[in-house]
Amino acid sequence: MTKSPKINVLFIADIVGKPGLDITSRFLSSLLRQYNVDFCIANGENAHEGKSITPSEFSVFRQVGIDVITSGNHIWDHHKGRRLLDDETTLLRPLNYPDGSPGSGSGVYALSKGGEIAVLNLQGRTFMYPIDCPFRRGKKEVEQLRKKTPLIIVDIHAEATAEKQALAWYLDGMVSAVIGTHTHVQTADERILPEGTAYISDAGMTGPFDSVIGLDKKVALQRFIGGVPQRYQMAHDNIRMNAVLVSINQETGKALSIERISLP
Ligand SMILES: [Fe+2]
Ligand SMILES: [Fe+2]
């Protein structure tokens, strides 16, 4: 078989709790076929009832065809998630947490059609915990990853659109895609930057849409209006799946197209 120069990567937006897992299980196998997906990444920071991920969600993810799971600030919310980070090389946490944090922030993985692809997880600092600089730490890591493969997908888990856009310009031409996560609302700004990096500010959410970014509406309102902390409670209605499909030239690592997906 001749080697195809094109690689299709599916990135599934933050999967929230059992509703998110269920809809991913329902749609993923047909999506993988329909789009000839070579590699599938999902953000799993909210997989366990909205907070972190445990071995049971992790094994479902792997069984349904997700190759690598990225995360973000919520990965630390469950002790089993912390332990999983040390046990599983296909589960990442943002790279720019201080040295010595559990797990790792990037990985290089084999593609079934040959060659390798790298995934890098970063986290923003604007309106978030002030961890290490995602720009400097990110670029340093990209330079190392590029010694192994030009195919690099970056999950920038951040609150501020400006910070995500800035990172995409900073890494334009050095990585295949910069995909935003964390805000749980899919943005309509997908594009390919001049040097060949695909970009979207946020991939969205895979979970209950009749909610406040996955949280039960009543609880969210109590939090905002009452000002008193309330226990997290997941919503369950109007479940949707958000994702992004990126096609990449396998030899150059440059993006050919980026497409938003929202189901059903
Ligand atoms: Fe999230
Ligand atoms: Fe987050």
Image (cartoon, rainbow, N blue to C red):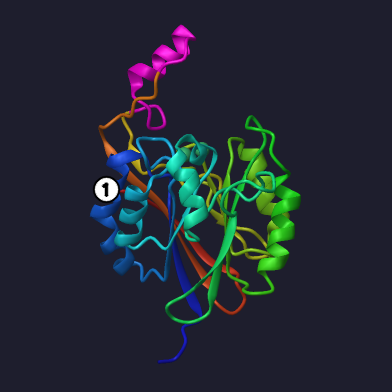
Q: Nearer the viewer, residue 66 or 55?
A: 55
Q: Nearer the viewer, residue 101 or 188?
A: 101
Residue 162 picture location, percent across and down: 66, 39
In this picture, residue 37 sits left or right of residue 123: left
Q: Give the residue drawn at x 69%, y 74%.
A: 147
Q: Is residue 58 magenta?
A: no
Q: Is residue 227 magenta?
A: yes
Residue 202 picture location, percent across and down: 51, 44
In this picture, residue 173 sits left or right of residue 184: right
Q: Which element carries disc 1, helix, strand or loop?
A: helix
Dot 1 crowding, Cα within 10 Å, few <14, some 14–19, many 20+: some
Q: Give the residue drawn at x 42%, y 16%.
A: 230
Pointer 1 residue Cβ closer than 8 Å to ligand 1:
no
Whether 121 is drawn above or below 112: the answer is above
Single out the residue that lies furthest toward the bottom. Answer: 1
Residue 11 picture location, percent across and down: 44, 56
> Which quadrant of the figure has residue 236?
top left
Task: Look at the image and tell me whether residue 91 can be seen.
Answer: no
Task: Look at the image and tell me whether residue 132 can be seen.
Answer: yes
Q: Give the residue drawn at x 54%, y 70%.
A: 117
Whether 222 is drawn above or below 122: the answer is above
In this picture, residue 229 sits left or right of residue 28: right
Q: Give the residue drawn at x 45%, y 57%.
A: 259
Q: Amino acid at mark 1?
A: Ile
> Which quadrant of the figure has residue 232?
top left
Which stretch is magenta? Answer: 211-230
Residue 155 picture location, percent across and down: 55, 52
Residue tagged 1 = 23
